Amino acid sequence: MVTTAWRPRGRAASAAPLFAPLVGRHPWAGAAGGPASSVVHPASPQAGQIALLWWIAVGISAVVYVLVVAAFFIAIARHRAQEGPPAGADPRAERRATRIVIGAAVATVVILAAWFGLSVASARALERPPAHPVRVEVIGHQWWWELHYAGASPSDAVTSANELHVPVGIPVQLQLASADVIHSFWVPSLDGKRDLIPGTRTTTWFRVDRPGVYRGQCAELCGLEHAHMALLVIAEPKAQFDQWLATQRAPAVPPADPVTWRGQAIFLGAACSLCHTIRGTGAGALSAPDLTHLASRRTIAAGALPNAPGTLGAWIADPHAFKRGTIMPATRLDGGAMQALVAYLRSLR
């Protein structure tokens, strides 16, 4: 029997990812182990620079708000304190008011000019190319992320989906592209948003300063399931990252028992192999996520569900119950066949 995990529905499910970067955690982040996602808790120099600008803007806005509200209440108090009909024009009062207006206009220009200068300086600092970075190609699809790590040779290249592993303390340069519509790569704790334009390649980079799991999100409306196009950035020490990379380069682990052998046969005989790749088998299609090491990932369906046997089986049986716009068709199998298929996929570490 295949069980499904609870997940938010309706407006709550669609709106919550929009507010997650502000509150610091996705409302149902348990599926991903509680990843960090906050513009005010930076974990990289790039995000730190953006957070500094954010706090300066908040501070200036707060001061201006307090001054405007104070002036409003002072004006009300003076009006109430005035007795009798309004007096004639007072030249001194008019000159004082004129000076205040001019001073406010000059202060506004100075603040805007300073803000513009800070923004330009920050943008230039963020655009400086790093030396000896780890290079990753990121391709946005409706609605998942494809990741390619270059190697010394084609056989050393690594392909993954929806999880970006990076080493701590080493610059990571991303080559961004889109396979269909405009997407936007945004990991609030690590960097600002960067658009992925069809037919154009853009570049961004960051350096993570502390280990952790950081949640990213497509930040450009890209269709029906835009809100469920998440990405996890997993920052780990260099030795762990190298070990992960070496594991990902290996082909899929062959089945070890009759159940997983049956599951592999079902996978290769069903429509699954027409879209997915599992290296080391006859499945080599490129239109859907590479599943060679599926079981090593924390989530499935671009962060929509935790990677657990029940949710994996539910996703295979009826993906449209979780992501209505996905191109993946439902796979109708009896209980034993579904359990064998899930067991095989869960063995791909």
Image (tube, grey):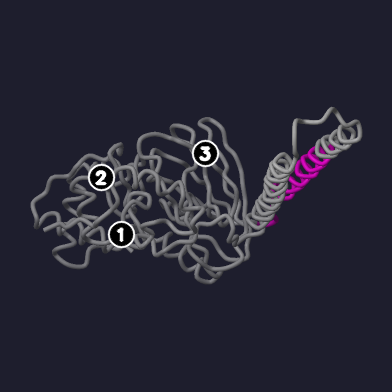
**Which residue is denoted by mark 1 in the rendering?**
307
Magenta-colored stretch includes residue 241: no
Please provide the residue range marked out in magenta. Answer: 106-132
Determine the secondary structure under disc 2.
Answer: helix
Q: Is residue 123 visible?
A: no
Label pair 3/2, CB-CB below 8 angstroms: no
Across and down, in percent, residue 62 comes to 67, 50
Across and down, in percent, residue 116 comes to 76, 41
Looking at the image, which residue is at 33% across and 49% down?
A: 301
Determine the secondary structure under disc 1.
Answer: loop
Label 3, label 2: how many angstroms apart (C-alpha)?
25 Å
Q: Amino acid at mark 2?
A: Ser
Numbered mark located on residue 273 in the image: 2
Front residue (pair 170, 8): 8
**180 shown above or below 256:** above
Disc 2 packing (10 Å; few <14; some 14–19; many ≥20): some
Label 1, label 2: how many angstroms apart (C-alpha)?
20 Å
**Which residue is denoted by mark 3 in the rendering?**
177
Q: Is residue 193 visible?
A: yes
Q: Amino acid at mark 1?
A: Asn
Disc 1 packing (10 Å; few <14; some 14–19; many ≥20): many
Prevailing secondary structure class for the magenta stretch in the rendered image: helix
Across and down, in percent, residue 214 comes to 49, 59
Disc 3 packing (10 Å; few <14; some 14–19; many ≥20): many
Question: Disc 3 or 2, which lies upstream in sequence?
Answer: 3
Q: Left or right: 241 with respect to 118?
A: left
Across and down, in percent, residue 192 comes to 60, 48
